[in-house]
Amino acid sequence: MPSDRNPSGHNPSGRGSATHIVIVGGGYVGMYTALRLQKRLRGELRRGEVIVTVIDPQSYMTYQPFLPEAAAGNLEPRHVVAPLRRVLGRCRILNGFVTRIDHASKRLTVRPAGSQTAGVPEREVGYDLLVVALGSISRTLPIPGLADCGIGFKTIEEAIFLRNHVLHQLDIAASNADDEQIRKRALTFVFVGAGFAGVEAMGELEDMARDACRSYQIDEREMRWVMVEATDRILPEVGPEMGRWTAEALRRRGIEIKLETLLKSAEKRHIVLSDGEEFDAGTLVWTAGVKPHPVIKGSDLPLDAKGRLKATAELTVDGVEGVYTAGDNAAVPDLTDTGEFTAPNAQHAVRQAKRLGDNIVADLRGKPRKPYRHAYVGSVASLGLHKGVANVYGLKLRGLPAWFMHRTYHLSRMPTVNRKFRITMDWTLAAFFRREIVSLGELEWPHQEFELAAGRQHDT
């Protein structure tokens, strides 16, 4: 098995004394940590005293809060991702899957991109300091039929597929005007999970489909949109009051909200719910939670009962030297709230990444680390064009003001001026022209069993 201290196989400084920092994962924590290190260690990186390597299966970071708008056609999908090689110009980017973390020997086992088709063997990558930022994967359940017809909503690829799929269902309905059974099935859309991902995806796609019905000569009242949630409320992040308002706002649009209800079966797209209702649905979207990336479970690093890395407030792995972590795969103590750990969301991940980067620099320069402390600002959610809900610093907004706050906040957090400008242009053009409703082809949904980009693991 090939082995190297850095992925290029050589030390650019010409000597073996360079400190090699490896960041596993190119999402929020991974990319923003690398950005922070680029800024704080500019001289060391230029002189070759420090090498920063980012390992991720994809060559880009997806800004997930904009996935619903990309799926609905409000944003160009390429504009909601940040290319790692362009953003992290002073870092090494290695596209591949980390299959094993062995901190005892300070080595990672990596399966490089293309290895399965080109016969490239796995390789080992050594490190001096390690940042574990693998994030999370969708948490699925062994529900009959879910693996065959369920669609996730965590990646840009899934957002693009879902947009094409929903529009293709309208194509099917319009092309089978005389077959009520086929038409009814095609126009039934089920979303399981009423957190941010599920509610925003349903809100945006229902808005898009309703707008598209005019071109398909379909009465929008023929469509059936069903939200299935196991708990007794939706959008818990915005608080009980705004969650109830969101549920009522969606119901006024004709969306069915089924609380305290479970999906029991989805075989052959026949939906069976725990409340006894059964019906066929052409679309089933699964957004019912996430769990830490499975690679950390097989590592020699300490985990908590939920499979997350045990982290300190300084964003180091508890009891382990030279390993840092943050984000969804870490149990980070919350120093500002009564909660035990920080919530697994983008707001914390981005801010944790900056503190993590600063703490790495402090360790390299022999200075004390600082703990991560950040009071939760609140939450904003989009429910479709000109519709939203927000609870920020105790200020509760709904409708157009909340939608505007959602767009403004997330635009400010989108990395690079290039992406900010392109997104602004997309929104500006959308104000003058109707969105496109064409489906760019519909492949048979592969039996991917939620083979996620992060390791392509089937979570059962």
Image (cartoon, rainbow, N blue to C red):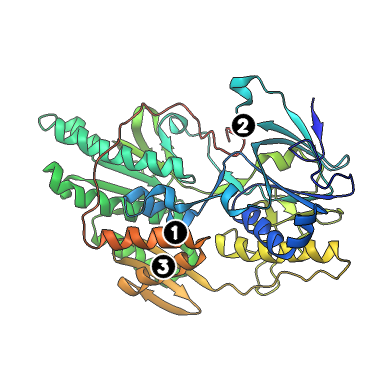
Q: Is residue 139 above or below residue 395?
A: above
Residue 64 in view (yes/no): yes
Residue 277 in view (yes/no): no
Q: Residues within 10 Å of mark 1 (few under 14, many from 20)?
A: few
> Mark 3 falls on what kind of element?
helix
Q: Position of residue 145 (x, y in %)?
A: 43, 30
Residue located beneath label 2 in the image: 113
Closer to viewer: mark 3 or mark 1: 3
Q: Position of residue 446 (x, y in %)?
A: 43, 27
- In the picture provided, is 370 more to the left or to the right than 214? right
Mark 2 to mark 1: distance in Å?
A: 43 Å
In the image, what residue occupies the spot 86% across and 65% down?
365
Mark 3 to mark 1: distance in Å?
A: 25 Å
Which of the pair 317/432 is nearer the observer?
Answer: 432
What's under tag 3, amino acid-wise? His
Closer to viewer: mark 2 or mark 1: 2
What's under tag 2, amino acid-wise? Ala
Quadrant of the drawing holding the C terminus: top right
Residue located beneath label 1 in the image: 232
> Mark 2 falls on what kind of element?
loop
What's under tag 1, amino acid-wise? Asp
Q: Is residue 408 above or below residue 154?
A: below
Residue located beneath label 3 in the image: 406
Q: Position of residue 411 (x, y in %)?
A: 45, 65
Quadrant of the drawing holding the N terminus: top right
Earlier in the chain: of badge 2 and badge 1, it is 2
